[in-house]
Image (cartoon, rainbow, N blue to C red):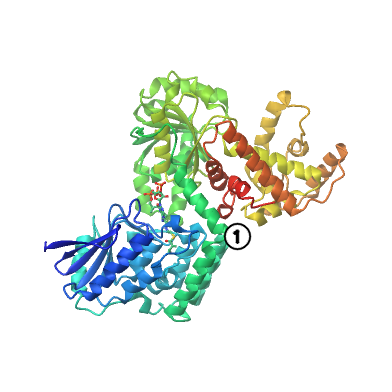
Amino acid sequence: MGEVTPIRFSEAVSASLEDGVLVVTIDNPPVNAASADMRSGLLAAIRHAGTEDAISAVVITGAGKTFVGGADIKEFGQPATEPILPEVVEAIEKSSKPVVAAINGAALGGGLEIALACHHRIAGDRAILGLPEVKLGIVPGAGGTQRLPRLVGIAKAVELIAAGRSVAVSEALSLGIIDQVVAGNPAAGAVAAARDLASQPLRRTGELALPVEDPQVIDEAVDKALSRARRGAAPAEAVQLIRRAGERSLAEGLAEERATFLRLRDSDQAKALRHVFFAERAAAKVPGLEGVEPRTVRTIGVIGSGLMGSGIAVSALNAGYRVIVVEQDAEAAEKGFDRIAGLLDRAIKSGRIDAAGRAERLLRLSIGSVQDLSTADLVIEAVFDDLDVKTELFEKLDKIVRPDTVLATNTSYLDPDAIAAATSRPERLCGLHFFSPAHVMRLVEVVRCGKTAPEVLATGIAVARRLGKLPVVCGVCEGFIGNRIFSAYRREAEFLVEDGAWPQEIDAAMEDYGFAMGPFAVFDLAGLEIAWARRKRQAATRNPSERYIEIADRLCEMGRFGQKTGSGWYAYPDGKRTVDPEATAVIEACRKAKGIAPRRVSSDEIVSRLLAVMAAEGDALLAEGIAERASDVDLVMINGYGFPAHKGGPMYVAKEGLHP
Ligand code: T1G
């Protein structure tokens, strides 16, 4: 190791000279974001290297577990301060001396753009790389839309940037985003590479020609990207910038990219998505859990391998856990295994795992009896949502599992306190309310029951996070946060039908607002009989003075439970959702029976009323202490019920006054 002469260029940027190579380290906790101080320090370091004959090359790396986590999102919404990131990136690329990126961790957004401007890129094996800007409602603003396609081609750049998808080093290497992968920290390898490059012509990414591609492959990538974007503005804008990368000079492309970035950065969608970004970080801060360590979980028992149980089991297998699946009998167990294997086969088909990955997961799966759960660290129950069934099961579990085993119920509507009361240690039970399909949906409501111990709650949160989920803590009430709000949403939607709006008009209005599916399409998909059964359970205690809509009851009495029976609010001839005169007749008869003269209801009124009831129910949940903060409610509705993320969530919309 040569002499090490520390030089400081700014608070966040220092460097050491190692045998002629200036090793620049960015140390700006917690994620080495490209703040104003970091940008000025990095620019100063590059300029310094250019003037010093003793320096033959430069390495840029990050301190800690991140290379550079992107632009400093906290600076958005404020006037840009010099030097802006494109200026720093340009100085790197135009450097007369080789600059090598030693990518020691996440290189995201501006972090990857810095690396793309380097002349060589070496990554440690745990790095991730991506341009996730569209998730913040913006496009890359420091060359990503112009440099990435020069390395990976337009089609792949469209796919990655329009979805904001990050890649692990293996994919990054195969795509040509990086040149080398090393085990552990890449800095040493980078110094050697930088020294070798000093005597070679520099490969400047921005000067590379676009790879030749089949126009049809590009068109297919564009179509797929735009179809997924729905109403988010940023993906479409990014696609255009990438497509035109090959039609004009780098300078022209960078200028248009920067203009687009600045325009989008101040848009309502970008502000809403920044709210969601910080909301996800806030949700991790749970009062009363400061300093509380979760218990160690290596083996997860899953009781029930139906739609939910099999999804939960696959999630746990994907996260590396040993999984014991328990069913009531051999036949059900076999069906459950087939469901799990089928989900893994689909994962192979979609390229998410390979055959070896499937085999490795199945090695960690065992199908057993309740007795086998004595080895489980956590047991998640996902059986039929009936209180007697669940309490009987937990009584049995209580005598089988270890005293420190955490028990969790996946119940959607039952009272987890009543379930906990069936055990001798109610403090070890929490709710883990997954959303179907459980191996896909990010949201998990982690239910803090009346007696849940802090480390049990912390364990539920930690496992949910390791499953790659978004845990949101809630208290106990019927429907927790999401289903409680969804019930209010459904009620108001039915009021609107009785007032004069048609289901198809309501669905169209909400889909135009940004929902993937309108409420009536969702009701038909989920099945009308579930809410019907609950309404019948509640009939005796229902407040007779409260407005009640019979339409869904009439539909259910006709056996119209939705898609599964071929008709509900709509009919489904050959599976296609169609307005059904029979449902129209039921609606008209119910209006007439109440003496209601139907009136025209505008889309604006539909959206305003449905957004208002969601926010009102959210306020009630906050007042009752069921939800910790308004942004948690937004996260639940976005990640569990299709509320458009680029609108920020019902509480955000209400607070910002974004819909009349
Ligand atoms: N700016 C500011 N703060 C950030 C930040 C960022 N880019 N990323 C994270 N934080 C904060 C976060 O709010 C939290 O704060 C703490 O750091 C830990 O975050 C020009 C314009 C890097 C993978 O979108 O994906 O570059 O709650 O819990 O789990 O084209 O953070 O502790 O107060 O997430 O270890 C593009 C966003 C920006 C990456 C680390 N970059 N960040 O995950 O930590 S736009 C991103 C992440 C851009 C350019 C454009 C993750 C991470 P607090 P964390 P983590």
Relative to residue 441, is residue 141 depicted above or below? below
Q: Residue at x 76, y 38 (%)?
A: 558
Q: Residue at x 65, y 55 (%)?
A: 513
The image shows a total of numbered marks equal to 1
Q: Is disc 1 placed on a helix, strand or loop? A: loop
Q: Is mark 1 within 8 Å of ligand 1?
A: no
Q: Position of residue 479 (x, y in %)?
A: 59, 34
Task: Name the residue beneath numbered marker 1.
Answer: 231
Q: Residue at x 33, y 65 (%)?
A: 40
Q: Residue at x 52, y 69 (%)?
A: 260
* 393 or 428: nearer the viewer: 428
* 543 or 62: nearer the viewer: 62
Relative placement, left or right, of 76 versus 550 is left
Whether residue 504 is visible to the viewer of this picture, yes or no, is no
Quadrant into which the N terminus falls? bottom left
Q: Residues within 10 Å of mark 1 (few under 14, many from 20)?
A: some
Whether residue 165 is visible to the viewer of this picture, yes or no, is yes
Q: Position of residue 273 (x, y in %)?
A: 52, 54
Residue 72 in which image quadrant: bottom left
Relative to residue 361, is residue 478 depicted above or below? above
Give amino acid for label 1: Arg
Name the residue furthest left: 2
Relative placement, left or right, of 491 versus 247 is right
Relative to residue 575, is residue 57 depicted above or below? below
Q: Position of residue 492 (x, y in %)?
A: 72, 41
Q: Position of residue 165 (x, y in %)?
A: 44, 59
Relative placement, left or right, of 346 versus 22 is right
Name the residue furthest bottom: 248
